[in-house]
Amino acid sequence: MGVRVEMPSNQPIVLLREVGGDRYLPIWIGPGEATAIAFAQQGMAPARPLTHDLFKDVLEAVGQELTEVRITDLREGVFYAELVFASGVEVSARPSDAIALALRTGTPIYGSDGVLDDAGIAIPDEQEDEVEKFREFLDQISPEDFGTNSQ
């Protein structure tokens, strides 16, 4: 769904939506990752590659395909993810980094049923207006709103 800043803590979150369901998964992330995700969603290319852009370029250079990102676990308030490659290799990653990379590579993102059961928030159809307001907010936010400088 996108990135937003949670008030009053001013903490960025990324919001994932369940395909074919009514659950949403909010994951609190850092401002750098929020910027990286927002750049990817808006199709913005920085003058110099961000870390996630570099990682995508390295994967292409070495011929590795990222086939899926899995949000696998939630322990003591910390989310865990895995990068899954066509070769069968799986690499542990922070969900925010995994999502930023997935957006750049067009890779699907999957949340485990356990994570969705534990942290997913059901938003019934009648509350879709609120979700639409969130979408409108996302359309108007820019990476600069997160207060980080990219080099």
Image (cartoon, grey):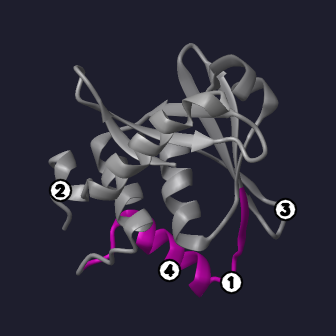
Q: Residue at x 77, y 35 (%)?
A: 112
60 shown above or below 24: below
The three-letter code of the residue at mark 1 reads: Gly
- Disc 1 secondary structure class: loop
Contact (Cβ within 8 Å) of mark 2 with mark 1: no
In the displayed orientation, state which residue is furthest to the right: 88
| Picture quadrant of residue 30 | top left
Residue 70 percent across, percent down from the top left: 71, 46
Q: Earlier in the sequence, mark 4 or mark 1?
A: 4
Nearer mark to the viewer, of 2 and 1: 2
Span shown in magenta:
48-68
| Picture quadrant of residue 8 | top left
| Picture quadrant of residue 125 | top right
Marking on residue 104? none
Q: Whole-Å distance between the Cαs marked 1 and 3?
A: 14 Å
The three-letter code of the residue at mark 4 reads: Asp
Residue matched to label 3:
88
Between residue 69 and residue 135, name the one nearer to us. 135
Between residue 66 and residue 1, name the one nearer to us. 1
Marking on residue 144? 2
Identify the image quadrant of the C terminus.
bottom left
Q: Does residue 94 appear in the picture of this structure?
A: no
The three-letter code of the residue at mark 3 reads: Gly
